[in-house]
Image (tube, rainbow, N blue to C red):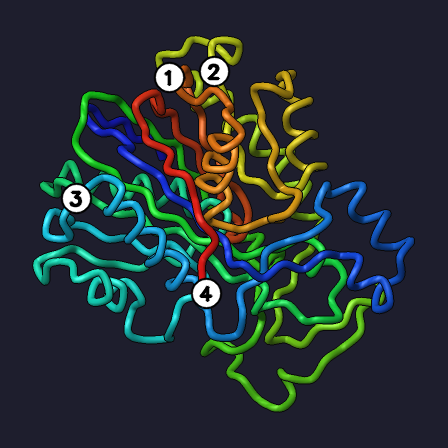
Amino acid sequence: MKFTFKDIEIKAIYSTTPKGKLDFTELNTLFGKDEIEKVTKVTGIRSVRIADSQTTASDLCTFSALKLLKELDICSSQIDGLIFVSQTRDYQLPQTSNVIQHKLNLPKSIVCFDLPLGCSGYVNGLLQASLLIKGGCENVLVLAGDTTSKLINSRDRANRLVFGDAGSATLVCKGKSEIGFSIYNDGSGYKDLIIPAGGYRLPSSDDTKTNHKDEDGNFRSEENLYMNGMNVFNFAISQVPKLIKEIVKQSTYGNLEQVDCFYLHQANKFMVDYLRKKLKLSQEKVPLEVDGYGNTGPSSIPLLLTLLNEKEYNLANKEKSILSGFGVGLSWAACYVNLKNTKIIKTEDYE
């Protein structure tokens, strides 16, 4: 599905990560030094940020929202839309966006909803914010974050050496820019990234909590995150390049060469490099920031922008930008947007 909106802009972005850090060398005894070195060479991830037991994705996102509003000197009463994009929500019910509305002291007349999407979630969140703006809202907060580490079995090498935790806040409002979206979903691959038990299809039980060892030596229960890495990789390299070409054609950019920068979901180094090479793009146009953070799900794109800004990457001239997320669902999404006037706020670790 394609959408194009006039007079909408991303006003500001703030991202944060928990202070807790897992250096993969700490897992040498558990997984073996040689195995960890082999994995990190491929993924480009040597450590990740990990939230403690008391910190949730909503905590990280609420912290980010408070910092963003303070930096912009915007009153909470001016926010009339709130979208919480996360797969690690506080409760089964009520929706976490209502909890955040109360914590941020936002108006009771606000539109709130949760969007339980992962790696494509940020772009989908921007789409929903744009729809709200066109429907009458003035300022919409998109809070995207996950604490995926809480979903992973401590003896699951395949996932523990990939995923990290982060949260973000993005303010979408009326402006003078154009933003366009291309959105896809294919539920036939839903089993490729899944937590099989704990919902109503397969309720939690003693059996679903029992750990099992797979053929690769990873341990997990049916209440832990499972990812079929090869299927997800094949899906991404098959669908994402076509999506990128499609969103560029949908924009006024002309062709791939005219795009200033492609901000892709930060799955891992191998994935991002493969997509870049398949699209025949330079490293400068497809930045990578996974080391120290890992795959942070729906917060990976705003976190990427924040980290690049702190390294003085030239975002000011990135008028023609492409954002693209892809993964669990299976779902893939992209948008074109002008980031020239977007304020990327210097981040702080969550405490």
Gap in Å between the C-alphas at discs 3 and 4?
Answer: 28 Å
Horizontal side, residue 287 vs residue 99: left or right = right
What amino acid is labelled 4 in the image? Thr
Q: Which residue is under mark 2?
A: 260
Q: Which residue is under mark 4?
A: 88
Depth check, mark 3 against mark 4: the one in front is 3
Gap in Å between the C-alphas at discs 4 and 2?
Answer: 33 Å
Residue nearest the viewer, comparing 188 with 325: 325
- Residue sitting at 47 percent across and 74 percent down? 54
Which secondary structure, mark 2? loop
Asked which quadrant contains residue 317, the reply is: top left
Depth check, mark 4 against mark 1: the one in front is 1
Gap in Å between the C-alphas at discs 2 and 1?
Answer: 7 Å
Do the numbered discs 4 and 1 sit on residues whose CB atoms are within 8 Å?
Answer: no
Question: Where 251 falls versus 205 (above or below)?
Answer: above
Do the numbered discs 2 and 1 sit on residues whose CB atoms are within 8 Å?
Answer: yes
Q: Which residue is under mark 1?
A: 319
* Image quarter (top left, top right, bottom left or bottom right) of the N terminus: top left
Q: Which residue is under mark 3?
A: 74
- Residue sitting at 46 percent across and 48 percent down? 299
Mark 3 and mark 1 lie on one chain; the one further toward the N terminus is 3
Residue 130 x, y percent position in the rendering = 24, 37
Mark 2 closeness class: few <14, some 14–19, many ≥20 residues within 10 Å: some
What amino acid is labelled 3 in the image? Ile
Mark 3 closeness class: few <14, some 14–19, many ≥20 residues within 10 Å: few
Mark 4 and mark 2 lie on one chain; the one further toward the N terminus is 4
What amino acid is labelled 2 in the image? Asp
Residue 154 x, y percent position in the rendering = 70, 71
Q: In the displayed image of the protein, which residue is found farthest to the bottom?
A: 206
